[in-house]
Image (tube, rainbow, N blue to C red):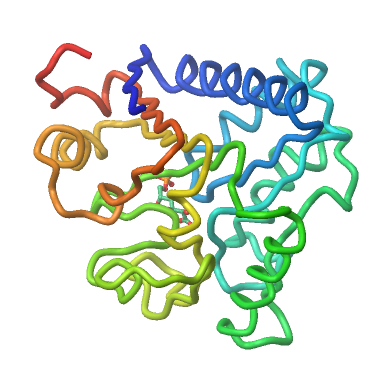
Amino acid sequence: MSKIQIFKDADVLADSAAQTFVDLAKQAIADHGYFSVALSGGSTPKKLHKCLAETYKNDVDWSKVFVFLSDERFVPPYDELSNYYMANETLLELVPIPDENIFPFVTMDFTVEEAAELYETELNRFFTGSVAFDLIMLGLGPDGHTASLFPNQPEVLNPSDSLVVAVHDSPKPPATRLTFSYKLLNQAKNVLFLAGGQNKAEVLKSILEDEADLPATKVKPSQGNLFWFLDEDAASELNKAT
Ligand code: 6PG
């Protein structure tokens, strides 16, 4: 199931995404005792994280939330470019989530290929059976990239059987990254794209209405739900009533 929801502005977008996060967490915990979520990087999630850490902090049983990252820059965890650093600053250190429930990528002392293998091993150890997240959060770049799946990159041109892949020469610095693969993304129970701002309007029209062959277009959970949460600016070039 794919669903597009449009919200007035960035604040309402973030609050609505936070409410959905809480609802999915409650459902997952009631269903199987825990909530597995992969957070996305970039700047858009910061408002969402703030809502979760402030408005909805007491609505989630954080002891049963297990946090991964849908992609990472290959920089030390204390580097401000790190997605883990951003998630920690804006959410994880502000809520009572046990350290052992947080799974950052290893981005030091190993090659980026080794780091991808280590994370894949971690995922297979955490999930019994197939690696199917309760929720994967994703952002969207103006070039149609998502996570660290960029146009004309090997994983986009020829999706692999891996769950996590190393990325070199990313057009969005830093050049070396790690990312969930399409295989992993498309096994998720729920995928939520969060996109706001006028600079995403053109690419959203290409993806949602013109089915352009872009990295984000290939995110189609085979069994799961696909949510597009947009603000009015980002949705401004969409024609169809949604
Ligand atoms: C990253 C992100 C990337 C991001 C988009 C949108 O590591 O940079 O994973 O995919 O989500 O580029 O970024 P903004 O939210 O800053 O627009």
**Count of numbered labels shown in the rendering:** 0
Which residue occupies 53% across, 37% down?
Answer: 189
- Image quarter (top left, top right, bottom left or bottom right) of the C terminus: top left
Relative to 178, residue 90 above or below: above
Q: Nearer the viewer, residue 82 or 230?
A: 230
Q: Is 176 displayed left or right of 51 in the figure?
A: left
Question: Where's residue 167, x and y in %?
Answer: 44, 75
Establish if 114 lies above or below 216.
below
x and y percentages locating residue 142 in the rendered image: 26, 48
- Locate residue 30 relative to residue 2 in the image: left or right: right
Point 51% across, 34% down: residue = 190
The image quadrant that residue 52 belongs to is top right
* Residue 114 against residue 38 in the figure, above or below: below
Q: Residue at x 26, y 51 (%)?
A: 144
185 left or right of 217 in image = right
Farthest front residue? 129
The one nearer the camera, 133 or 152, is 133
Instruction: Identify the image quadrant of the N terminus.
Output: top left
Residue 116 found in image quarter: bottom right
Which quadrant of the view contains residue 169?
bottom left
Q: Is residue 185 placed above or below 35 in the rendered structure? A: below
Q: Residue at 61% across / 37% down in the picture?
A: 134
Q: Where residue 93 sits: x, y (%)?
A: 82, 42
